[in-house]
Image: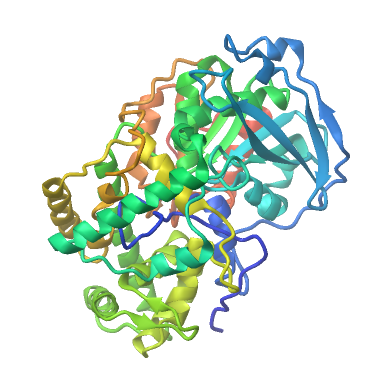
Amino acid sequence: MKSALRRPAGARSRDRSVQPAAGGGARLRGFAALCLALASLLVLSACSLPFLPTPTAKPSTSTVDPSIAASAPKGLEKYYSQSVKWSSCEDGFQCAEVKVPLDYGNPDSAEITLSAIKLPSTGTKKGSILVNPGGPGGSGVDFVKDAGNTHFTEKLRANFDVVGFDPRGVKRSAPVTCMSDAERDAAREKVFRKETDQGLAAALAFNKSLAEKCVEKTGPVLEHIDTVSAAKDLDVLRAVVNDAKLNYLGYSYGTFLGSAYASLFPENVGHLVLDGAVDPSISNEELTAGQARAFEKALRTYVDDCLRQKECPLSGSVDNGIQEIRDLINAVDQNPQTAKDGRLVTGTEFVNGLFLPLYDNQSWPALTQALDSAFSGDVSQMMRIADLGADREANGTYSSNSAFAFQAINCLDYPMVTDTAGMRAEETRLKQESPTFGAFFAYGGVTCKDWPYKNTRTPAPVDYTGSAPIVVIGTTGDPATPLEWAQSLRKQLENASLVTWEGEGHTAYGRSNSCVSTAVDDYFVDGKLPQDGLQC
């Protein structure tokens, strides 16, 4: 049976630069919320666990225990001791707003509001687990609202409240705002031939104009949505849910946020699970190259599997099948096609449609179907998949600001190569390391060259001195966060345990097997650290 392209309400994913055609670069997204978008590619999805009933959520006011409030850094006492009202919302959940400083360097100057959602425990509560689904730019509120009842095991749900939040700059929490929906559609149809001087100049001009719009529409928070500030927010959230130690599950970019937290607040670490790890010590260019290689590897694995299926539109050897896909990409890139809804499908958007199903091998049949149609001259299905990745609904509205948040956060978190010679040299290397996708990863520096605020950090190994061990999870066939990043992060943390899932796709917990879920659940609930080097 062929795959159905349908998307449940609230489903989403992320990894975009604001206008992928204008600038390439690294792509991160967490499987946790991405699973919701991928589920729409299949009639039956293997992304989720059996549905668990939602307990009745009664409104409550959370008053911070004085001993927990006492953990506040100097000058932040009012934020750590604030009372938070949790109101019933979303049929069985509780929602709240939490105040944090706009600028931690000047905490008395102004404040912003973070949105949070709680899925109450089904049994005797041990505490809360805060979750981040990835990004940067992913909505933890949407993830918990849409997948909280299915993504976490019964054991975990019985012992913990699951709390999602939108980090600063994301959707409901002082969001980065840059374009109207119509402008976003128009931007996705633009084609910049950045390998030419004229095309590169046009891409730079586009991004400079975009940055000016972001400043105008977003306001002062745009300067303060870096990951270090978000990690400090995470400690405020720990306090207002009344936990003396942080229990946290972060996917993809969420591991970057989690490792930043561990460096800043080592004594406040309780149980941290970092799934689909990002290596904080590598540069933006090294991160981009690692992903380009990993996606090339994932495509090869997909093609090998496709050729074994009766309905595969590819032929010959694996190398032949990959070349057929490259030829198709090149044809669309050189002559953009029109989808059935009248929109132009560029080479970049076609590749975005290719990327999304590579995050989960259960979605490979949907990719096969879309490729089959594309080889027959209809790129509409590939564009629909790209829309899922861009959070575009069928009615033309966009359900998130993840694309804008992604760019704004990355420009603060990473110094980037932005000179023409450097970007051209990177393009050459990426094409060598990833012949299929390298050109689409190139020129990431374009998005940040004229960003109004300079980066606030430089890549460095995580410095963790806490006594609580941390769990890092890597997946052998992960296209977005290669296994070697998880191995590197585990070494940097030192006091940690590495769990490896031998599987395909992005991240593991919630989509892999009982070996992984048992290891994570026993760690959170029983304090049992999985054996370092556990293979699942």
Q: Residue furthest bottom?
A: 376
Residue ID at (49%, 23%): 262
Q: Is residue 125 above or below residue 315?
A: above
Residue ID at (63%, 12%): 71
On the rendered structure, is 72 left or right of 275?
A: right
Q: Is residue 373 above or below residue 86?
A: below
Q: Nearer the viewer, residue 408 or 167?
A: 408
Q: Nearer the viewer, residue 317 or 42?
A: 42
On the rendered structure, is 388 left or right of 371?
A: right
Q: Quadrant of residue 50?
A: bottom right
| Residue 477 position in % (x across, y down) | 38, 55
Q: Is residue 389 above or below residue 82?
A: below
Q: Nearer the viewer, residue 296 or 46?
A: 296
Image quadrant in which the N terminus is located: bottom right
Q: Is residue 222 above or below residue 333?
A: above
Total residue callouts: 0
Residue ID at (59%, 59%): 399
| Residue 38 position in % (x across, y down) | 54, 64
Q: Nearer the viewer, residue 70 or 320?
A: 70
